[in-house]
Image (tube, rainbow, N blue to C red):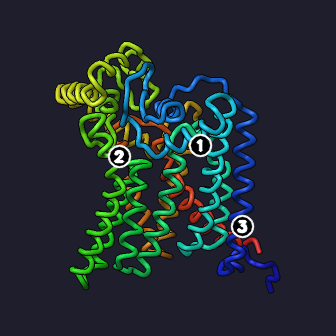
């Protein structure tokens, strides 16, 4: 008789789950913060648009000036994260102290992602062992170093937000309640998510589309529920839309699509964000272009760039198709200068597919939510160029599914070893 207790023996004990999550969180934070201290770069000038807007918020209370010279109010980035980051700068300054506090914040968010993997594995019916495999692997799985450890972009927080959104969707799918309270709560949650990152809107829309079959028994109640939810989300967005109408001339969520499209499709474009030289074309690197943005306005500048991009696309269909195909390929099989790292990242994608099949056999609702994320979230990034931080918000789905496959293989090997 096997007297060794199974890792999954306490899987139904909430205390066991909580203790495991705390341990994983502490270890993941310690590992990340150690890397921050070992590889400091706090004296490097801030260059990202997000950080520039956060500095503007900290110093003037305005979301403005994302580029190399002052350009005025901006909607280049969504408002929530630069306000959070700007608040950190207000407390700790914009020098080394502020950068360190910013890194601590990023490490906390990234470590929380590792801990949340255990809870997701439990609620998905994969077991504590799968969660531990995912959590431990997540400690060392750092694919976007500056994004995850430096906190210069919202991707880690967006990833954590998407995990919570998936948990809520899982709970709702198990016991759908089309009541006023759930509609208001989910509506507010979705509105805040869009203010954090509009790239979360496609998964939200996909999740809502998934509720349609649940509401077929009472269409009137479902329609009222959905209307209240969407209305609540819209009310959260209204202040940001009104602000942009007043100071920029249009109620946009974000204004930078034209710029990004022109960087992704031109005669010098490459699939990766940093594979081609954008020194002469990006306003954050070229002061002359930044001054042009200030002169014509951010929205007009982006309309110019969008027109320029679509003109190039129409005249170069073959090159456009090649670039688009590379964007899709790179999203799922990221490029890397190190051949071993490139192979490892490809293996994660392949094993996540096998793990997804394991998840599907155990929990069809959970697997349905994962496939909705995989289908909806990357759509905008298939159009624009590749960057490791773009995929970061859904990296946890790959880690969790890969862990499910690893656990399945272990369960087959363990009896043989015994």
Task: Tell me where residue 242 appears, x and y as whole percent.
Answer: 29, 45
- Mark closer to the observer (3, 2): 2
Marks 2 and 1: in contact by CB < 8 Å?
no
Query: Can you tell which mark lies on residue 240?
Result: 2
Disc 3/disc 1 C-alpha distance (Å)? 22 Å
Whichever of labels 1 and 2 marks the residue nearer the N terminus, that label is 1
Task: Tell me where residue 12 appears, x and y as whole percent.
Answer: 65, 81
Disc 1/disc 2 C-alpha distance (Å)? 27 Å
Within 10 Å of disc 1 (Cα), the crowding (few <14, some 14-19, many 20+) is many
Of the pair 9 and 223, the residue shown nearer to us: 223
The residue under label 3 is 20
Q: Tag 2's secondary structure?
A: helix
Q: Tag 3's secondary structure?
A: helix
Depicted 121 relative to depicted 10: above or below = above
The residue under label 1 is 148
- Write the residue at 17% across / 25% down: 315
């Amino acid at each position: 008789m096997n007297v060794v207790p199974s890792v999954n023996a306490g899987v139904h004990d909430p205390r066991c789950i909580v203790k495991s999550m705390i341990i994983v969180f502490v270890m993941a934070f310690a590992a990340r913060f150690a890397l921050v201290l070992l590889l400091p770069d706090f004296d490097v000038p801030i260059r990202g648009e997000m950080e520039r807007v956060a500095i503007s918020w900290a110093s003037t209370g305005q979301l403005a000036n994302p580029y190399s010279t002052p350009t005025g109010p901006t909607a280049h980035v969504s408002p929530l994260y630069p306000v959070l980051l700007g608040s950190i700068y207000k407390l700790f300054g914009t020098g080394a102290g502020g950068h360190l506090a910013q890194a601590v914040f990023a490490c906390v968010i990234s470590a929380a992602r590792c801990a949340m993997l255990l809870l997701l594995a439990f609620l998905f019916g994969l077991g504590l062992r799968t969660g531990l495999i995912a959590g431990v692997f997540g400690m060392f799985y750092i694919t976007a170093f500056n994004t995850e450890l430096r906190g210069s972009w919202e991707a880690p927080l967006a990833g954590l937000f998407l995990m919570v959104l998936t948990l809520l969707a899982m709970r709702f799918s198990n016991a759908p309640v089309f009541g006023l309270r759930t509609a208001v709560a989910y509506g507010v949650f979705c509105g805040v998510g869009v203010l954090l990152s509009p790239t979360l809107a496609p998964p939200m829309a996909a999740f809502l589309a998934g509720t349609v079959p649940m509401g077929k028994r009472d269409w009137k109640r479902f329609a009222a529920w959905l209307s209240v939810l969407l209305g609540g989300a819209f009310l959260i967005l209204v202040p940001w839309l009104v602000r942009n109408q007043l100071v920029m001339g249009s109620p946009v969520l974000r204004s930078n699509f034209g710029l990004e499209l022109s960087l992704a499709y031109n005669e010098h474009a490459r699939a990766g964000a940093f594979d081609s030289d954008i020194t002469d074309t990006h306003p954050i690197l070229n002061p002359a272009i930044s001054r042009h943005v200030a002169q014509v306005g951010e929205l007009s500048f982006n309309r110019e760039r969008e027109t320029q991009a679509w003109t190039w696309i129409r005249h170069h269909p073959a090159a456009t198709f090649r670039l688009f195909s590379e964007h899709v390929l790179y999203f799922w099989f990221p490029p890397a200068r190190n051949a071993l790292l490139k192979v490892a990242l490809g293996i994660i994608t392949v094993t996540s597919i096998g793990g997804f099949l394991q998840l599907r056999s155990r929990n069809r609702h959970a697997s349905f939510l994962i496939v909705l994320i995989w289908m909806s979230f990357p759509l905008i990034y298939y159009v624009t160029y590749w960057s490791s931080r773009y995929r970061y918000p859904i990296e946890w789905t790959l880690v969790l599914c890969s862990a499910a496959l690893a656990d399945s293989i272990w369960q087959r090997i363990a009896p043989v070893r015994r």
